[in-house]
Image (cartoon, coloured by chain):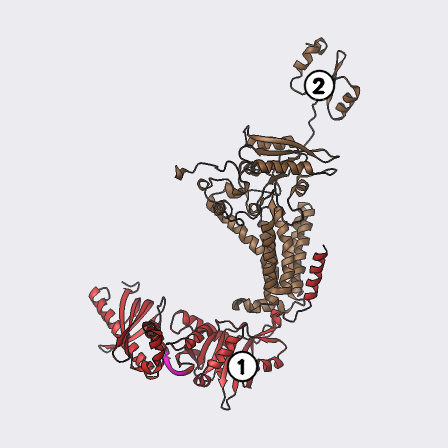
Amino acid sequence: MPFTDVRPHEVKELLRQAPVVLVTDAKKVIEGIVNGGVAIFHDGSTYLLDLYSPESRSVQQSETETVITGPHDSFVESLTTNLSLIRRRIKSSHLKIIPCSVGEISKSKVYILYIQNIANPEHVEEMRKRVQRIETDGILDGSILTQYLEDSPNSVFPQFMITERPDVAASKLMSGRVLTIMENSPIVVSAPAAFFEFFASPDDYYQRWALGTALRMLRFMALLITVTFTAMYVSVTTFHYEMVPEALLRTLAESRSRVPFPPVYEALLLETMIELLREAGARLPTKIGQTIGIVGGIVIGQAAVQAGLTSNILIIAVATSAIASFVIPSYMMSASIRLIRFGLIILAGTWGNMGLVMGIALIIIHLSGLTSLKASYMIPLAPMKPSDWKDVFIRAPFSMLTKRPTQVKTPNSTRQTDKKQE
Amino acid sequence: MRRMLAIVVVICLLAGCESDERILEQMALVQTSAYDLLENNKIRVLSSIPVIEPDSDVQRQLLTAENDSIKEARLIFSRETDLTVVSGQMRNTLFGISIAKAGLARYIDTLLRDPSIALGVKVTVVNGGAGELLSKNYKSHLDTGRYIDHLLEKEASVNSIPKATLYEFSRDYNDDGVDPVAPMVKDAGEKATIDGIALFNKDRYVMRIPARNGLIFALMKNNLKQGEIALNMGEVEGRKLVVMFSSLLSKRKVKVHHLEGERFSADIHVNVRGSILEYTGQEDLTDTDQRKKLEEDIAAHVTARAEKMIQDMQRNKVDSLGIGQYVRNSLSYKRWKATEWKDVYPRVKINCRVKVKIKDYGKYI
């Protein structure tokens, strides 16, 4: 049947597939066309159809959070795609969305997602308040949004977890956390977050529990190494010659004996060099980035030792702590920890082990004082919640992971029924 | 913000106080010190310091000083080297027999007083001149100090000599009812060698237990988890009977009996388990009865050697096995205080009760 034969009351019936409105104002018609709509002029009346579907990046693998096994999709810049990625994983009517918008000029859409009866209503309310309280011209990305939302924006440590992975986002929702997701950004913010959450990777769960546990322990060891190794080198070679084991004494002293600076300058020099390399590698295209790695890592490292600028044991210490810092799955956390390391090196160079211990104490005090959405950040260590440890410091078998994390204070803490108790 | 600025300024200013910096390669790290008493009652201190110059042929340098005290020697050393002389990496102290006979207490006290010297620093007696031993260059070992230190460490781990560190020596010296001991080394031409165990009365060296009896001494003094001993049990039909008793596990118990008239007797029960690695006798060890017989022979042999050793110790009034501690524990404080242990000790009847069990007799069947 030709369109001209359609009667006016039949138009809406025919155009059911897309949202269609009858418009009478010419200005609105123009605005609609500018926004990507289609106008249909029929029999004296004008219909406006919203058929706008902008080009967006297809769903690809995440570059910052990679896993070996498990799903490889990641969020993209399209809000509807992102929502569908989450909806696909949680097909529950309890998944609720609070729509908000931020930015006086940008008017970006922000959705707060939570699962009713699992998420703590106080957290949802607090998050909604914080989103609505933002007054700025525009926010362009989820990682900027989180800095507006965090409890202590001046702390070096990230207090909200950000992720690009829909599987992580879904697991956060199911453990009772609140997601904040924003249009034009692949970054999803999950809150509240705990310090130790940043050391978990989805791979821990996709692999068998013994391996997952080993990986967790490896990461906590990496944390210790990256924070203290270089600083320890500095304090031992500057102040505490007593602490050097006999077997290491000669090699350490020999490699130091050609270096013209005190250990603290030597360490800062090399740490800065490593950071330069890392930053150069991050800004350059991947192909050139590899060249930088070879030039920087091998050529400069080798030459620096031969030129007598640094000792080769320090090269090992600095390289080990750099590698250890990359083991930490969250890029935000690993960057924060690399930053505080510089402070510790200076403290170790000025006051030796006393400075180092003071620095670590200050970090722990600071961490214990932090909150994430008003929940304690250092949970399950402060306050002490040993029942949570089996999913924090180790990754226990799934049969033992029966409860949701205590940090959330969820109204429904049972994840699965404990078979042993039945 | 202003407070942060103040903190940064203070940190920068405090960095100027670097007098207590001890940068590793600028230290002369004393590895071993040797002390000898000279005839004019002065002390000769000889310290061995590793040379960390990468292009240097020598591994160590020796600094020596003759004066009245240990610490004064360090000041003299300091004048001879471009490095700061420190003792925080000290591993071993060698005391010559002359100084050991005169008493070690004041030197041990000096060493303990220095907080940079660890309690784990070994105390060793040299049968001869300590300085001579340390300054000698052995062909196969570049650093004599390190060589002796490793030698002592290894031998102590198999219990043929007791572990004697500043901690153990001063503990036994200050404790009631036990006398300190220390391993003894001597120069044997091409090598340095363990010469036995030096026994002290209070802090004075009195007698030596020869090296071949080292493990017997250890059996009487401690519970062992390791050790081996070759037992030369006489001759059978013209052939020497040697038993190598190895992988020892032993438990020791001391029981004190009160006899009339302020006299005591003590039984040292020792239960030894071990395997036979060498046996030159005629008996068939697979046979249970003959093995039992060998066990009894070994026990009798060990008992005889131990009792002779203890008699020597009693004659010299050294209670290195710590029998006095067990007597003390069986008495009231008042009675112990009234007892002059050093006078009572030689008259204590000490019996050794050794039980031997052969776990296995090697892989040969």
Residue drawn 70% across the image and 29% down it? A54
Extreme left residue here?
B289
Which chain is the one coloured brown?
Answer: A
Nearest the eye: A292 or B195: B195
Chain B: its colour in the image is red
Instruction: Give the residue type at disc 2.
Output: Val
Q: Quadrant of residue B349?
A: bottom left
Relative to residue A138, is residue A22 depicted above or below? Answer: above
> Which residue lies under the disc numbered 1?
B70
> Which residue lies under the disc numbered 2?
A21
- Observer able to see residue A185: no
Is the residue marked by circle 2 packed among few (<14), some (14-19), or many (20+) residues within 10 Å?
few
Q: Quadrant of residue A126?
A: top right
Q: Tell whether A147 sits left or right of B49.
A: right
Nearest the eye: B189 or B262: B262
Is the residue marked by circle 1 packed among few (<14), some (14-19), or many (20+) residues within 10 Å?
many
Q: Is residue B208 magenta?
A: yes
Q: Tell whether B8 sits left or right of B60.
A: right
Q: Which residue range is magenta in the image?
A: B205-210
**Circle 2 marks a residue in which chain?**
A
Q: Which element is circle 1 on?
A: helix
Q: Are marks 2 and 1 in contact (CB under 8 Å)?
A: no
In which quadrant of the rendered image does the N terminus of chain B lie?
bottom right
- Across and down, in percent, residue A200 comes to 54, 45
Nearest the eye: B1 or B182: B1
- Across and down, in percent, residue A374 comes to 60, 43
Residue drawn 22% across the image and 69% down it? B293
Residue drawn 67% across the image and 52% down it? A292
